[in-house]
Image (spheres, grey):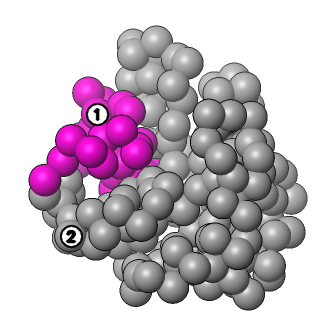
Amino acid sequence: MDLPRVYPITSDALTSKELQTSIRRLASTKITIFQYRRKTLHESKVKDELALLETVSSDMNISIIINSYHDKNLDNNFSGVHLTGEDLKKVTFRQVDRNKFFGISCHNKEDILKAESLEADYIFLSPVKETPSHKDLQPLGWENFSELSKKTKLPVYALGGLSKEDLSEAEKNGAYGVAGISRFWSH
């Protein structure tokens, strides 16, 4: 599976129309994958939006990874699943076929070990820096991130308070790439 170095996650702040426009912009920057994570939308709106995005993403040759928060909306039309940290605690086996992406959000060594046992394709390790979306978690900082990323052979994405411009710093600290929400949808 071909994983990108820059991995955008959808923002709850975008309207459906803005999200479609943003996906088209992603294609122009050669980003080929994004995670759908829209926790503030009503379930019926999520289903409608996913139907729209599936068409747009297919036309643009961009893979949609569905956050496990939306597990009621999962079907075989998407390119994979990304488990939340909460869902990681509940599962005991790989959640998707081997021909689909399977990512997991991790915050510590135990999470990483479990992700390996579940045969994840990649992990997000977060938060590296302070971030408004996870105010309850203590930032790892680059030193702790580096130490944790050395404990796995899985591709590790740095996440939390970062932008695309942090890719070089992330790679110096053992990351495969960077992931994020607010600063990842523009040129």
- Label 1 Cα crowd, 10 Å radius (few <14 / some 14-19 / many 20+): few
Amino acid of disc 2: Ser
Q: Position of residue 19 (x, y in %)?
A: 67, 35
Classify 10 Å Cα crowding around label 2: few (below 14), some (14-19), many (20 and above).
Answer: few
Residue displayed at 36% across by 31% down: 70
Q: Residue at x 64, y 71 (%)?
A: 144
Classify 178 as above or below 163.
below
Q: Is residue 113 visible?
A: yes
- Residue 71 on the magenta segment: yes
Residue type, mark 1 in image? Asp
**Is residue 70 inside the magenta stretch?**
yes
- Between residues 153 and 62, which one lies in front from this camera angle? 153
Q: SS at mark 2?
A: helix
Q: Which residue is at 79% across, 65% downward?
A: 164
* Nearest-to-viewer mark from 2 and 1: 2
Q: Is residue 24 visible?
A: no
Quarter of the figure with the N terminus = bottom left
Please name the residue shown 55% across and 18% down the image: 40
| Residue indicated by mark 1 | 71
Label 2 sits on residue: 117
Q: Is residue 89 above or below residue 115?
A: above
Q: Choose the circle earlier in sequence order: 2 or 1.
A: 1
Q: Is residue 42 left or right of residue 7?
A: left
Report, in whole angstroms, how far the alpha carbon at label 2 lies from the one at label 1. 21 Å
- In front here: 165 or 35? 165
Q: Which secondary structure lies at badge 1?
A: helix
**Mark sitting on residue 50:** none
Instruction: Say left or right for 86 vs 166.
Output: left
Residue span colored magenta = 64-92
Asked if disc 2 and disc 1 are in contact, CB closer than 8 Å, the reply is no
